[in-house]
Image (cartoon, rainbow, N blue to C red):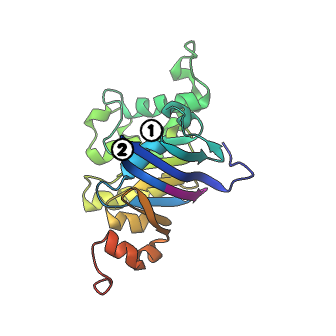
Amino acid sequence: MSNSPSSPWALEIKDLYKNFGKTEIIRGINLQIKQGERVAIIGPNGAGKSTLFNLISGRLENTRGEILLNGSRIDGLKPFEINRKGLARSFQITHIFPKLSVFENLRCAMLWSKGYRYSFWHFLAELDDLNDEVEDLMERIRLDKKRDLLAMNLTYAEQRALEIGVTIAGGANVILLDEPTAGMSKSETTRFIRLIKQVTEGKTLLAVEHDMGVVFELADKIAVVVYGEVIAFDTPQAIRANTIVQEAYLGVSTDQAH
């Protein structure tokens, strides 16, 4: 789905609030993310990052405010409706079919976007165009040599790569990644950052990530969330030098900051 001519934003969040009872978790967040931009969301534990992701992807309903995807409102829609409009999300805990092969996981994820929805009369093995695209995606996420291996038998890093593949298989142009490198070794993280850059090229990326090395390597811009508010949204270089961020998030005073 292409951007609305009246909106240059792939994802736009306007004055977003989320209350749980009398407790405000998200307090008036505003964000505007351009098409093809990579944005990292950082902040201390309890800042509201996961709640914000759940609001954007439709797993929670907002208290007030608006969320627009490619110029169209998506707040109030169900997760599968948002997905069909062009937004896909991966989770902190891997969500794949453990007893299906790598190939079968990716093919299942791609079926809807290719128009094979409730067509029970199609034999999957005969869908040459679809199967070719799955093979291509499998090579891009570097799991082509594990084609027929059950997902449950992949290493942790390979399972995360498969989930990235599943996330982009539906053709979404806005991708949400929830702590994509959590639990990985340093070498795995380095390879995974490279993979994310390659497979999301040209797409809009929004990622929650605690590893600041990953954040500065991956993001075009960084949104700093503290107590449910965005206190800064800028380039990695500007965020690194921002004294408000240093004091509120990094936990250092201005005279200690490097």
Image height check: is 218 above or below 79? below
For marks 2 and 1, the one nearer the N-term is 2
* Measured Cα–Cα span from mark 2 to mark 1: 37 Å
Residue at (51, 31) in percent of width and height: 80
Extreme-top residue of the structure: 121
Q: Residue 166 carries which label?
A: 1
Near-viewer residue (185 or 136) = 185
Of tags 2 and 1, which is closer to the observer? 2
Can residue 168 be seen?
A: no
Q: Does the magenta stretch include residue 147?
A: no
Q: Give the range drawn in magenta.
A: 29-36
Q: What residue type is labelled 1?
A: Val
| Residue neighbourhood size for the residue with mark 1, other residues' Cα within 10 Å, grouped as few (<14), some (14–19), many (≥20) | many
| Residue neighbourhood size for the residue with mark 2, other residues' Cα within 10 Å, grouped as few (<14), some (14–19), many (≥20) | few
Q: In this view, does 89 lie to the left or right of 249?
A: right
Q: Residue 26 carries which label?
A: none
Q: Position of residue 162 (x, y in %)?
A: 39, 41
Can residue 174 be seen?
A: yes
Residue at (57, 58) in percent of width and height: 32
Q: In this view, does 52 lie to the left or right of 204?
A: left
Image height check: is 124 above or below 188? above
Q: Which amino acid does label 2 sit on?
A: Lys
Residue at (32, 54) in percent of width and height: 181
Secondary structure state at the residue bearing disc 2 = loop
**Residue at numbered disc 2:** 22
Q: Position of residue 210 (x, y in %)?
A: 32, 60
